[in-house]
Amino acid sequence: AAAEKGGYATFMEKEIYEQPHAVRDTLLGRTDVEGRLVLDDMSITADQLRDVDRITIVACGTAAYAGMVAKYAIEHWTRIPVEVSLAHEFRYSDPIATERTLIVSISQSGETMDTLMAVKHARELGAMTLSICNTHGSTIPRESDAVLYTHAGPEIAVASTKAFLAQITACYILGLYLAQLRGGTFADDAQSVMKELHEVPSKLEDLLGRMDRVKEIARFMADTRSVLFLGRNVGFPVALEGALKLKELAYIHAEGFAAGELKHGPIALIEAGQPVFIVVPGPGTPHELHKKVVSNIQEIRARGARTIVVAEDGDEDVVPFADEVIRVPATSPLLAPLLTVVPLQVFALHLSSAKGLDVDQPRNLAKSVTVE
Ligand code: G6P
């Protein structure tokens, strides 16, 4: 078993460190010599995809958070409306779908019953179904019209890490492909985003080399009873995922919020010493979101929160209000989740092992839930 873990203490740690490969391998072979996207494992025709007027993403757990990231990115790049539905809610909500609707399921295992049933329901409604899946030949891709495989390799730890990054990457590929089909400036913009996406794996390698401080913070916080996570735009699902990882692995009460929602309720939770992670959008993010999140940090710090800030290299604006700054390499705003989620995964992993818990097999959870 030790050999299988490749020298790491747990499968989860190994899988976290495999993330640069997961992203790189998922991107591999998807562009031709001119940099145009090619999706060779896609059996829905380009003409059918050009007609898509609505996308609904169905998934559960971490995969649903990948879908939330995808919503922001795909809508921005294509102007096609994207909705994210928890698969178990989708089916019984009398969902709207036509033959021009693309239902995208996201599943690491390809066996999650809730997600499978959502796909079957979508087919009954006459929608096109596309599966983003990490497991070749599994049930969900077999039940779908088309499949875009993620190449994260087998994921053993129950809590998903590298599959999550690969799912987000596959969603980006899909969004950029749809943008390319739209042509004109959509296609031009897609090409430049694709170039930046190809730079992410080496940025991930760099990032994974600087996790020592995160491990220390996790060890110091072994007795913590509650942790909050704030994010905005694509940072919002990252906050939700950070909180989920902590619940799953360390059995700590954790919640993720959209930073703008703070003043509408959650700020009441802030008291002296309350740890809060804040995922800060890069300074180049449109609509001054960076400035707005920095002022959120200031507000909660003034009320005694212990602020642990995830910010881009070179972002000095956060420093005066941060108890800890965790640096991530800069990238374009919509791609940032591939980097900002990593310290949150590492934090949850090390907090769990500091508490002496079973990182790879948390209580009450299964790797794939094949019952409804
Ligand atoms: C289970 C796992 C989660 C996972 C979810 C969806 O609940 O514990 O880690 O995110 O299923 O799994 P899937 O295989 O469909 O991505």
Image (cartoon, rainbow, N blue to C red):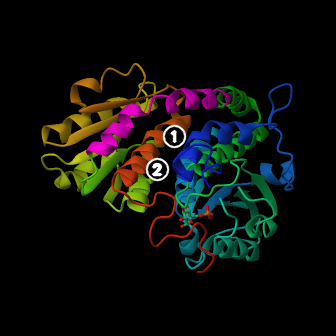
Mark number displayed over residue 370: none
Would you say the beta carbon of the disc 2 residue lies within 8 angstroms of ligand 1? no
Please say if 328 is above or below 51: above
Mark 1 secondary-structure assignment = helix
Residue type indicated by callout 1? Pro
State the image coordinates of residue 346 (x, y, percent, origin top left).
44, 43
**Which residue does the numbered mark 2 point to in the structure image?**
237
Q: Is residue 63 magenta?
A: no
Give left or right: position of 5 versus 249: right
Residue 290 vs residue 81, the one in the foreground: 290
Number of numbered discs visible in the structure rendering:
2
Q: Quadrant of ligand 1?
A: bottom right
Q: CA distance from mark 1 to mark 2?
A: 8 Å
Specify few, some or many for label 2: CA neighbours under 10 Å numbering under 14, 14-19, or 20 or more.
many
Q: Which residues are magenta?
A: 198-220
Mark 1 highlights which residue?
337
